[in-house]
Amino acid sequence: MKFVNSYKDKLRKYNKEHNLKYYIDTMGCQMNENDSLKYAGILESMGFVPGGESDSNVYLFNTCCVRENAENTLFGRLGMLKQRKIKNEEVYIAIVGCMTQQKHILDKIKKSYRFVDIVLGTSCMSIFPEKLYNAIINGQDKIEYIDVSNTLEEDVPIKYQDKYKASVSIIYGCNNFCTYCIVPYVRGRERSRRPESILKDIRELASNGYKEIMLLGQNVNSYGNDFEEEYTFPMLLKEIEKIDGIEIIRFMSPHPKDFKDDLIEVIRNSKKVARQIHLPLQSGNTEILKKMNRKYTKEQYLELAMKLKQIPDVSLSTDIIVGFPNETEEQFQDTLDVVKKVEFDQIYMFIYSKRNGTVAAKMEDKVTYEEKVDRLERLKKLYEEILPKLNEKMVGKEYKLLVEGKSKTNDKLYTGRTSQNKVVVFEADDTYIGKVVNIKIDSQHLWYLKGTIVK
Ligand code: SAH
Ligand code: SF4
Ligand code: F3S
């Protein structure tokens, strides 16, 4: 579905006189961040300009509900804006994204946060301009529930913040229904973007000087499963590889169950695909994995991870959930065991969070919260023992790196990430920004490395 904005001129005209500023607050994953760039693109095409957290007029909250805590954050922030509404300041509030796809959230907004102007779910950017127009020109819009729309919106304007690296969504939604996860319920079924559209976007980015691309999807290696013809994620990667100007290609997340040898081959033979692969583990125990509906065993995961580690210089990152309902100490030990064997360079760790409506929410759970926190701490400790050893192995070697900009803490230093996604700081000057250089690693400092540009 092509994105058409028939309210663009009308709101542009209004903004010529009123100069309304917008502020976007993004929660959640990179898919949401990518969506927020599109909301920024839509708003700017209608004449809104970026503003600050306290002096803006249009506030857009792009929400996440994958774990518990986000709700309180959202409602706290809304409370503050209410004061400005009461003072009759020109303030409009839009809540969009995953959280609003849940009925209980919508009911709460309707009941206690009537001052909110717009509520939209996922995949409904096309109706955002109309809703905004109604809120600004016609007074408050009616808040209604919008069912997960399984549409695919193309040609939405997008406003990238970085100048050299950009994210590109390739597939929306999820069909996997891992039992703990709310995403399939709030993002709908898998919809792959046509390869022509993706390639067109990336070619355009390359011609505008972008060097690094991050391909996004809840399960990127399901890409193309919904096409009639045979077109797979590895095939797409091969096409992107051919685009001049693009030097680093990243993607997230692949699902281990769908990580086939053809993908490994494409990565191995590629000069551009980053030597970092995010391979979500979730649990290292086969019974828990079965209860999670992950469709792989501990052994299958280990086999895949070891195959990937044979690609020279590859680093692996992962997501782990501790404290899934009734996870025993022995089962948790399996997770630690996999972490020890695979030696991940990066681990995103989460305590299991019960999400209403999912299958796991109905499972009995005798594990106390204290025990879950303790497991998280032990996992963290193990990771922090492994990480310096991995970093140490990089010292003395040379790596490809995109110079991103100045270090935030030291004016004389610059930063970038290696293909392995390791943060490196080094001496340089502004002419290096946006260039891909070779860097030699001099020392490791747990969360970052120090290096010297070689050429
Ligand atoms: N599609 C991606 C993950 C999306 S959600 C994948 O399959 O890897 C990002 C991460 O949040 C997940 O990998 C998982 O580790 C975590 N997560 C999802 N649901 C969760 C829950 N109910 N409690 C705790 N962590 C959760
Ligand atoms: Fe959630 Fe599983 Fe889909 Fe990832 S693959 S979004 S964890 S249901
Ligand atoms: Fe959150 Fe939605 Fe992403 S629930 S993790 S923002 S897909």
Image (spheres, grey):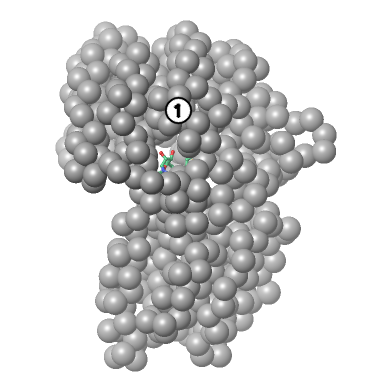
- SS at mark 1 in the image: helix
Residue placed at 70% from the left, 29% from the top?
232
**Where residue 192 sits in the image (x, y, percent)?**
68, 43
- State the residue at coordinates (82%, 38%): 228
Q: Quadrant of residue 261?
A: top right
> Dividing the picture into quarters, in which one does residue 78 lie?
bottom left
Please indicate whether residue 441 sits to the left or right of residue 264 in the image: left
Whole-percent x, y for residue 79 in the image = 29, 77
Can you say whether 177 is above or below 314 in the image?
A: below
Callout 1, which amino acid? Glu
Mark 1 burial class by Cα count in 10 Å: few <14, some 14-19, many 20+: some
The percent coordinates of residue 207 (x first, y second) are 60, 39
The quadrant of the picture showing ligand 1 is top left
Residue 82 in the figure: left or right of residue 132: left
Q: Quadrant of the C terminus?
A: top left
The quadrant where residue 340 appears? top left
Q: Is mark 1 within 8 Å of ligand 2?
A: no
Which residue is the site of mark 1? 287
**Extreme residue toward the right, this view:** 229
Near-viewer residue (340 or 323): 323
Residue at 50% x, 76% y is 118
**Depth order, front residue of 386/415:** 386
Query: Which x, y percent locates residue 249?
Result: 53, 29
Residue 308 appears in view: no
Q: Which quadrant of the figure contains the N terminus?
A: bottom right
Q: Residue at x 71, y 36 (%)?
A: 224
